[in-house]
Image (cartoon, coloured by chain):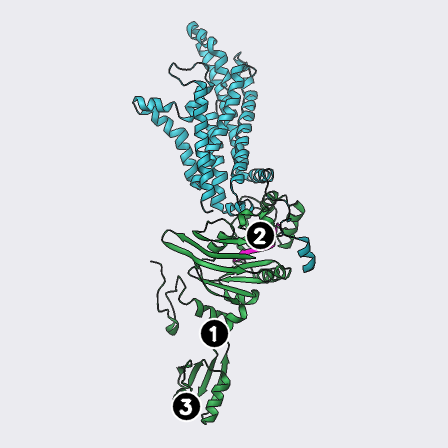
Chain colours: A cyan, B green
Amino acid sequence: MSTAALQSSRPQGTAGPGPSFLRVLNSEFIKFRTLLSTLILVGSTVLVMVGFAALNAWGIGQFSEASQNDPQAAAAFAAQGADLTAGIPTSGIAFAQLIIGSLAVLLMSSEFTTGMARSTFSAVPKRTPAFIAKLLVVTACAFVVTVASSLLAYVAATPILDNYGFDIDLGSDHSRRLLLVSGVYVAAVAAIGMSLGTLLRNSAGGIMSLVGLFFVVPIAFQLIPGEFFEEARKYLPDSLFERIVTAAPAEDALEVWQAWTWLGVWVVVPVAAAMIILKKRDV
Amino acid sequence: MIEATGLTKVYGDKTAVDGVSFTVQAGRVTGFLGPNGAGKSTTMRMIMGLDRPTSGSVTVNGVPFAQHAAPLREVGSLLDAKAVHTGRTAYNHLLAMAATHSIPRKRVQEVIEMTGLGEVAKKKVKGFSLGMGQRLGIAAALLGDPQTIILDEPVNGLDPEGVVWVRNLVKYLASEGRTVFLSSHLMSEMAMTADHLIVIGRGRIIADAPIGEIITGKGQSRARVRTDQPEQLMRLLADDGVSVEVQDHELLEVTGLPARDIARTALDNRIMVYELTPLQASLEEAYMELTKDEVEYHSLITTGAAAPTQTGGQQ
């Protein structure tokens, strides 16, 4: 190509399409699905969800058989039987949230640890669209993986329960609520994880912070005596999730809308902080 | 065209780039030369909007980089061979970058072929050599067919064939009327590639001139003279702006006087001269001369006369 031809074909300002949000979203989705670590972590989530559901189904069956000889226990068991089995498909969620949450941390922290961020933010120098696109991909993945693996867990648990004469009524309000709220909750955990990855830019630090928040702090608050910790425990994300899905709340529990609001706060604050810091800091 | 005005970057108590102003013109290869830690990479990251200048500003074709409607189509950059997630294949890396600007797969394939990555494109970047990493970085820079190309140390880690390839590529790109800005700490490489040089040391611009001008320096000519009457000749040559250094028993190095004048003086005074060699300053020497006070990390082992009079600024 001659110099003249090239220059005339490239008048300034009409170089071609730039990074619209949909294009950035597409790019982030390509980045998401082309990493082996994504596949491994998503696969582990499915395994954990299905495995726990199967174990749980078996445990409930064994317990019901053991209580056959005790009419009182059997009656009590029968009374709450439906509620017990409804929780089976999502019984692995405490671990699923950590795996998906870690995946979310990694997807952002690895941008910085590998230097990929320099490529990403050269292509999208305004940065915020890339963050939001990644956030959408990550939270959508978290929701879909949680709901889909819960459904798979249902499929796996049903024949086991069948042996003991139980079943799961997926169509019940409680079941549907559990399924959807679990998906939303794990998406929220992923959003928090991705924000931690953005703020700390460090994989180990981000994952440890996440584990701390969802594993260590709740247990610590339970162990430390005192009204303050008892009250504060209610506002931790995992307690908020429990509150939203429970059919029989405690007397001093938060209202459901309050729990939703607080969960929203847990998401919005780190996400906003991450977006501001990402925009300001050098890459 | 890249225009920097009073560009400054301060990290804590260290000033990495200290109020630099320069213009990189289209249609020629502009080299950005300086010792390690001189501020080359920081300056380039500021051009790309990755680092925020502490003060000053820099524009590409009149607009700050981040404000271009299609940044990848405006400026292509290789800032660091490792600006890639190593768990991804080269092809997928380029595909993800291309997706942000709707650059077709055909173009991705094109830059892969252009940079000679065809055989390894479907392999994970993890296993790439430094040279292949550089080729991938250059492929990414060319993806948007940009008018301006910024390459930070592009020949680092390349084999000789790769070095020649980069040299020809940047010359070709400049000949197409594009703006090409490439950094290096290797003066010899710059001598082969660049048309214009911007020399930076300790965050300040030391020189900004066509490469020929930098080599000839301040117009100081030097010559090596062998004579059996060195003392006498020294006395005769001594003048303002002329320095004579005794290098050996009968060997002098005369700076600031053309060889012809030395020969004339010797002839007029009947002093026998049995060697008179004009010395051409290499870019290397010109560079050392320019940067000798600006090098941040001096080697501890230095040879006699060349020993630095000061030690670096780092504690």
The answer as to whether the residues below labels 2 and 1 share one chain is yes
Whole-angstrom CA distance, mark 1 to mark 3, is 29 Å
Compared to residue B36, the image places residue A180 above or below, namely: above
Which residue is located at x 29 percent, y 22 percent? Answer: A226
- Tell me the tag on residue B229: 3
> Any magenta on residue A164?
no
A141 or B39, which is in the foreground?
B39
- Judging from the image, mark 3 belongs to the subunit labelled B
Residue B216 x, y percent position in the rendering: 51, 74
Q: Amino acid at mark 1?
A: Lys
Sequence-wise, which precedes: disc 2 or disc 3? 2
Residue B229 x, y percent position in the rendering: 41, 90
B44 or A207, which is in the foreground?
B44
Label 2 SS: strand
Compared to residue B312, the image places residue A76 above or below, namely: above
A78 or B302, which is in the foreground?
B302
- Judging from the image, mark 1 belongs to the subunit labelled B
Whole-angstrom CA distance, mark 2 to mark 1, is 35 Å
| Whether residue B126 is visible | no
Compared to residue B153, the image places residue A101 above or below, namely: above
- Tell me the tag on residue B76: 2
Q: Amino acid at mark 2?
A: Gly
| Residue on which the image places disc 1 | B218
Looking at the rendering, the stretch of residues picked out in magenta corresponds to B138-154
The answer as to whether the residues below labels 1 and 3 share one chain is yes
Label 3 SS: loop
Sequence-wise, which precedes: disc 1 or disc 3? 1
Compared to residue A72, the image places residue A32 above or below, namely: below
> Any magenta on residue B141?
yes
